Image (cartoon, grey):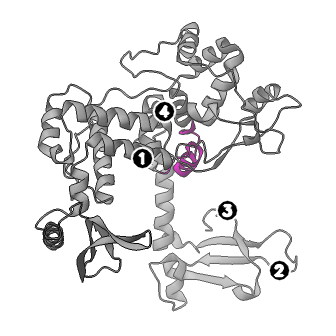
Amino acid sequence: MIAYVYQTKRRRNGKLVAGRMYRARVRFPGEHKTKDIPLLVTEKRSAEQKLQKILTDHSMASVGLIPPEKIQEAAAKQLKIHFGVYLKELATAGCVKRYVQAVENYVNTLLKECRWEYFKDVSAESFELWRQQQKKAPKTLNEYMVAMRAFLKWAERLGYVGHNALAKVATIRVRGRQKRARRAYTPEEIQNLLNVAGPRQPIYLLAALTGIRRGEIKKLRWADFKLDDENPTVTVSAAISKNHYEDPLPLHPDLVTALKPLKLADCKPEKLVFKGMFPGYIRFYADLKAAGIQWQDQGDGPLDFHSLRVTYCTQLAPGTPSERVRMALLRHRDPNQTAKTYTDTRMLPLKQAIEKLTFHQARDSKRDDTQRDTQTLVKTGQNGSSGVTLVLQGEVGQDPQIPTVNKRFFTQNQCAAEKEEWSERQDSNLRLRGPKPRALARLSYAPMPAIIP
């Protein structure tokens, strides 16, 4: 370990002159870098005392008796200063502006209403007391906690705090307490909306037939569309996608027909497709009113622009053989999000699915009795029947010289006459007439004839 105090020296007019202030040069055990620390004192004795305090504090911090120096420095700064740095970090990481603004509102509200000025003021008890006094929705309160917890996690990672004060705070149960989820549009409502949309019809049709989000549609460029290909597609690039993945999506023929007139001959690929055309919220709800669509919650959930995405997912459900296909079309990574959040079960053909059930219906008794008698005769050999013959024929296109082979189920009486052991398994009582099986081509079964007397 290296630890000593000294005064800086420099030459002035050819003479070596010492500085007034003392400094300390320290290299702690286990470290390879030597630190030069200004002590800001002019007396050597005072400088040595400050150096001794630095060494003592470092020794105590190394065994956890006092917080490290970095934590002490961060504790002396106000939370709003650290939070400003955190917001810049979110913007640098590529978080969308809307998300950064939401985090800023959540955390600033907590700092103000909980009276948190420094890291030492933040505690789980004060947060839970604030939460108990709120009348906000459970989902909203959880978002407040998630935003503040993420900020503290960032501070913990940088060494500003020793632990995350909200790490063990439980989230509020949301299931059964949330507001009604948005519902899907009915086919009639979609038709009415398209009829009154005018120049905005391709926008609504694109949202309803691709499920692309509102913010993503606004940023689509002509370079993202391939309308003249054999299989037309639109690609939601990673730069505008919510999940930051690049996903090509197939386009419905009606949508291709609606989009082609918008593209001019000299249109540049980087041009926005719907520049100056995209409706704001006031214009959108005016279109809903003109279409006679009630968007307020009337007991079945509200309607908004994002409900077009819910409609797309719901309408895919009955005709899609695989849930993985719907996940790919919705660009989801979680199957629960596709099956629960974006599927309006009230719009699914539940009644038609129930009507297809037939397992409870009575079967044809005459047909069942005939099958049962046939099985009994074959097994027991009653009435002296000679057995059941299955005709095996060669496949179409095979050598015509291949003979037809008769395969017989022998009855119990015939097995006894031929001194053969009768087996309860019918396939064990087969006998071949004609060439051996390995000499024949692949064979297919013909329909079973009636019992041969």
Residue 140 appears at what percent x and percent y? 30, 33
Q: Secondary structure at mark 2?
A: loop
Residue under label 4: 348
The disc, 1 or 4, on the residue closer to the chain's N-terminal end is 1
Q: Earlier in the sequence, mark 4 or mark 3?
A: 4
Of marks 3 and 1, the one in the foreground:
1
Q: CA separation, marks 2 and 4?
A: 55 Å
Closer to the chain start, of discs 2 and 1, is 1
- Residue 322 sits inside the magenta stretch: yes
Q: Amino acid at mark 2?
A: Ile
Tag nearer the camera, 1 or 4? 1
Residue range highlighted in magenta: 316-333
Mark drawn on residue 336: 1
How many tags in the picture? Answer: 4
What residue is pinned by disc 2? Answer: 402
Circle 3/circle 1 CB separation < 8 Å = no
Which residue has dot 3 on it? 447
Judge the density around disc 2: few (<14), some (14-19), many (≥20) Cα neighbours within 10 Å. Answer: some
Q: Compared with residue 124, is residue 4 higher up or lower down, i.e. above or below?
A: below
